[in-house]
Image (cartoon, rainbow, N blue to C red):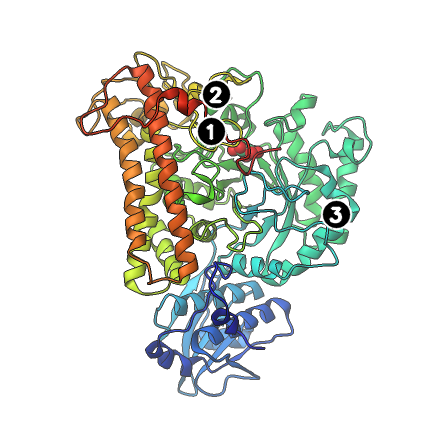
Amino acid sequence: MCFGLANQAHAEDGYDLWLRYQPLESAAKARVAPAVRYFVASTDRPIIAAAADELKRGLAGMIGAAPSQREKIDQAGGILISTDEVAFEVAGRPSGLGDEGYAIRTRNVSGKPTIFIVAHSDVGVLYGVFRFLRLLQTGQSIDNLDIIDAPKLKVRVLNHWDNLDRHVERGYAGLSIWDWQKLPLHKDPRYVDYARANASIGINGTVLTNVNANADILRPDYLQKVKALAEVFRPYGIKVYLTARFSAPIELGGLKTADPLDPAVQAWWKAKIDEIYTVIPDFGGLLVKANSEGQPGPADYKRTHAEGANMMADALAPHHGILMWRAFVYAAENAEDRHKQAYTEFQPLDGEFRDNVLVQVKNGAIDFQPREPFHPLFGAMPRTPLMMEFQITKEYLGFATHLAYLGTMWEEALQSDTFRPARGSTVAKVIETPIDAGAATGMAGVANIGSDRNWSGSQFDQANWYAFGRFAWDPDAKAGPIARDWARMTWGNDPAVVEPVVGMMMGSREAVVDYMTPLGLGHLMATGHHYGPGPWVSDLARPEWNPVYYHKADAAGIGFDRTARGSDALGQYAPEVVEAWGNPETIPEKLLLWFHHVPWDYRTKSGRILWDELVTRYDAGVGAVGKMQADWDGLRGKVDTARWAEVRDFLAIQHQEATWWRDASIAYFQSISKRPLPAGHKPPAHDLEYYKAITNPYAPGQAK
Ligand code: BDP
């Protein structure tokens, strides 16, 4: 097989993601080549075979020759990939590898250096191989290696919000890659590349279908299609999961009820789940969105979330399957601040869920906003495994055309101190620490993957898929080094490229916050598709669907009072947080308007009054996009033309839309604050009515 040639044969379009395996510089090649001339592996095992294939592919691309396979390590220049005792005898016995970790160590064999990539499981070996390739891709030395690494979370899954008709809810990268009509007989080769990419960052599961679920996916014919995908993913250590519609016993089973305490309903789920495992023996489990935004659930029968979840969990348990039950609930006709509803409903259920249930909690209590405080449930359910749900697809951060690296946002959420049970109990620590030995832990990311050649809708959105995997592996990871690794692998190791790219990425999310929702504002997007600004919207059926519900701007000021004087959502946090955030003077200014209603002339940290500060932030956001454009222009000729031009065009769209956000927001809020613009800030290009009249009925990704 001729690995690597494809890289040179076609112009780059982003399809290769961060696994481009471009030729190393000649000096590096000369250093590396002798060390990796051959490898030893037992390739009769599918996962080891996949690891060996990747090693060959990567080295063929980077040094121009694939290593040859040998029976045993007997001379210099070799790599041993193995789970065998004998390999550990030479490589040493590192502790802490667990089921999925690996060690990469250089050891002398017959006096000559040899690279050992060892693990207790085949998938650990696969992860080790990807790590080894990353060292080469990012220009690091492979001399005297001594690396030990293992994932801190067990369940590291993508959530595809993909419908069976291939529409992707909140998808900005084309159609669903799952071609249900052609499955199971035709398995698109792209599925293998999808699995490789995921395995390279440690993702070990994928929920194929939308949380707004269609019961048909559980029909026997669809299970055959799911089985075909499971077969493709298995050699990459990836399990498949499905979403379960709570009312499936009625829709598919013809029952009159889906009441979780009804024996016939329980029997239906048990039989269905047994059937799934007959077809797919290593099926991962189910994900459920219940009693939220119109989805059916146990509350329809006056049962709790725990009663609903446990019914399915009991049916999954004999197969070692897990049930992920979402905490993203807010009920119709509930007058309580939406911020409070998930906590109100779930926290009292702490300890009532079965061992194989993971309650899946979004990073913030509202909904994937450009900035939210951490969700108050983290730390508040010590007897329930909680998993993190991040949104990789940028529903609220400008879709695919806005450059926004989410690593900084996720680091901010994960490093937030819950103070539960004590100082230092960050969200990362909460989700990493099993509630008892062996209990499940996990992280889910709502995928940004579609049929576009570049997978994610834009080149830079690939970084968010990449970063999600790295944070799921290690929730204590840092956004900066992840951005740097991605930039090196995706755009090359030239510092004149890497530095500006990383600089753009690291400031990009804050730019979005500034031009969309500065100072703790949130949920001001246009109705339905969430494309562009709609802060004036006030006529939707449910109060909490309206942006005016969130900003509460009036003649006196702006912001949502969530302190004890207001909705007291703040009271759901630990006392230390309440104390720090309960006072507008001590709350981090970036969260000010999330928790406080403050006067327009409130004095902010900069010395400016709030209104002037708001306008300054909007302009800073637009300015930051202009700076990214200038930085990117500086890279013309330093990266390949097609990808460069795509990014240039998308930055131009982002600049236009950032300006739209800035102008529309200022026009609207000025109609309420009645204050002049601070000196040096120009008025919006049009009047408020102009912005209100903009409609975008065909914006992508809508729920349907
Ligand atoms: C919201 C999305 C909606 C999802 C929902 C969810 O707008 O499409 O169904 O989250 O997470 O942000 O269930």
**What residue would you read off at disc 1?**
366
Residue that mark 2 sits on:
546
Ligand 1 is within 8 Å of the C-beta of the residue at disc 2: no
* Vertical comparison of 694 with 69: above or below: above
Query: On the image, numbered disc 3 is attached to which residue?
Result: 222
Total marks in image: 3
Which one is in front, 124 or 300? 300
The answer to whether residue 657 is above or below residue 536 is below
Circles 1 and 2: CB atoms closer than 8 Å: no
Instruction: Point out which mark residue 93 bears.
Output: none
* Dot placed on the residue nearer the N-terminal end, 2 or 3: 3
Q: Are marks 3 and 1 in contact (CB under 8 Å)?
A: no
**Which image quadrant: the N terminus?**
bottom right
x and y percentages locating residue 212 in the rendered image? 63, 35
Q: Quadrant of residue 120?
A: bottom right
* Sequence order check, earlier mark of 1 and 2: 1
Label 1: which secondary element: loop
Question: Where residue 12 sits in the image (x, y, percent)?
Answer: 46, 63
Which image quarter has ligand 1? top right
Q: Disc 1 to disc 2, how far (Cα)?
A: 13 Å
Q: Residue at x 34, y 72 (%)?
A: 141
Q: Amino acid at mark 2?
A: Asn
Task: Name the residue type under label 3.
Answer: Tyr
| Label 2: which secondary element | loop
Which is more N-terminal, label 1 or label 3? 3
List the single residue furthest toward the top: 555
| Residue at position x 72%, y 37% in the image | 215
Q: Locate residue 645, reporting x and y percent.
A: 40, 55
Give the distance between the C-alpha atoms of the residues marked 3 and 1, in whole angstroms. 34 Å
